[in-house]
Amino acid sequence: MKFADEFRDADIARALSQRIAGEAGDKHWKIMEVCGGHTHTIFKYGIEDLLPSNVELVHGPGCPVCVIPMGRLDDGIALAKRPEVIFTCFGDLMRVPGSDGSLLDAKAAGADVRMVYSPLDALKIARDNPDKKVVFYAIGFETTAPSTALTLLRAKAENLRNLFVFCNHVNIIPPMKAILDSPDLQLDGFLGPGHVSTVVGIRPYEFVTRTYNKPVVVVGFEPLDILQGVHMVIQQILQGRCEVENQYTRVVHDEGNPKALDVLGRVFQLRTQFEWRGLGFISQSGLELREEFDEWNAEKMFTVPGVRVADPKACQCGEVLKGVLKPWECKVFGTACTPETPIGTCMVSSEGACAAYYNFGRYSRARERERAMGANGNGNGNGAVKELKPIEVKAG
Amino acid sequence: MTEQNPMSNGGFAGGDPPHVCITCSDQLLRMVVERVDESGMIASGSIEGEPAEIGVDLIDGVAPGDILLCHGGVALQRVSEATGIELGL
């Protein structure tokens, strides 16, 4: 596949891997990949197998399903249960446990809950069902918010009055700042989120270099993108530089997408604060609809419980989201909490660190054990392999 | 679309691990443009071999043959040729 295969070349990966190992020296490096998409690639392709043991990738908070607090989910489920409502959302959200079941449970009990691939699908459902109130539960970072904004602009232009948005869009920059301010975690640098950056550009990360003296490299989502990003972070530090660099130039422009930013500014404004699972309330980290969209704002047009709900005690998603715990260090990982029966959000979304690790990473650890015993790995490190392959996932 | 339909296996109970989530997950899908409608706001083409229609309000001058990165039914960026830096060269 053009624009993908060339970023899975095993020879280049091995060369990069050797360069990283040669330059990393004896220092223990901690580099956070902010985005859940990166976490997924890292586990899927066994990237950690290609890094020396002293280069540690720390998984960050960039999975929007994972950071939705339970109280906000309960609000959505309460809306879904209203008889006059058709509730629409993206697929992953439907499985996230609320304090009294999930959206799938509500659907099983008779609520009209529909999975959509785009908020524009919700717009169409609203057009087709004028006697119903269609609620779109909007989540996501700056990558997702433009499609919600365009949907609202179209609804307003059409004077479509039976579509409502329950807005949970969030910004990636404030949680990065919260993590940097946290005494729990000392990082050397960041792999910046590639697709968020298609919208916002690379300049919003300059505070990380300026205020916290940590390098940021915005990277793509193929295995070579990740490896090169790691190499660029290490090189910056070794060379005494601290900059925002753009590895993903085939997609990310320094200024982002000005049209998308304009649309976001017309529809949304910053909330004073927004709650993040595991990170608590972070000021100016969430988006809400501007006043001129009040008639499409589900929070203004419906009464929702609006109650803050604590996470289950056994769940340690908060520590995983902050990168303080590895997924397998959570007390319930892989036992009480699995993708089939998730307790925490990190196990629900495939981008969540726990699900990615459960689905792929545990095989990486199995290979580590095999190598220690003299057996072969999965082939990613084999000189005869020409292309990095996803890790084969075995049943069970 | 790469996402597994959550209804297809009774709500993910067992079976294959879910594919990449479209929710946000910072995942964009590549669409090869075949046609742009008269309004200039909708492009049709294929995503991973499947026919698709995408809003192109946020991209200027979309034309057949363009490769667009799409998310939530909207194109967010046009893909350009890879550069040396991205190939580790």
Image (spheres, coloured by chain):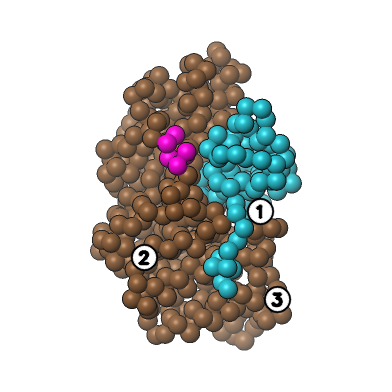
Chain colours: A brown, B cyan
Which residue bears the numbered disc 2?
A: A243
x and y, in percent, of residue A101 in the image: 47, 37
Which residue bears the numbered disc 1?
A: B16
Q: Is residue A231 magenta?
A: no
Pinpoint the chain carrying mark 1: B
| Badge 1 density bin: few <14, some 14–19, many ≥20, Cα 10 Å | some
Which residue does the image show at 66% across and 40% down from the upper left?
B63
x and y, in percent, of residue B4 in the image: 64, 45
Q: Are marks 1 and 3 on the same chain?
A: no
x and y, in percent, of residue B88 in the image: 56, 71
Q: Indicate which label's residue lies in the foreground, 3 or 2.
A: 2
Q: Amino acid at mark 1?
A: Asp
Which element type, helix, strand or loop, lies under badge 2? loop
Q: Indicate which label's residue lies in the foreground, 1 or 3.
A: 3
Which residue bears the numbered disc 3?
A: A385
Which element type, helix, strand or loop, lies under badge 1? loop
The number of numbered discs placed on residues in the rendered structure image is 3
Residue A131 drawn above or below residue A287: above
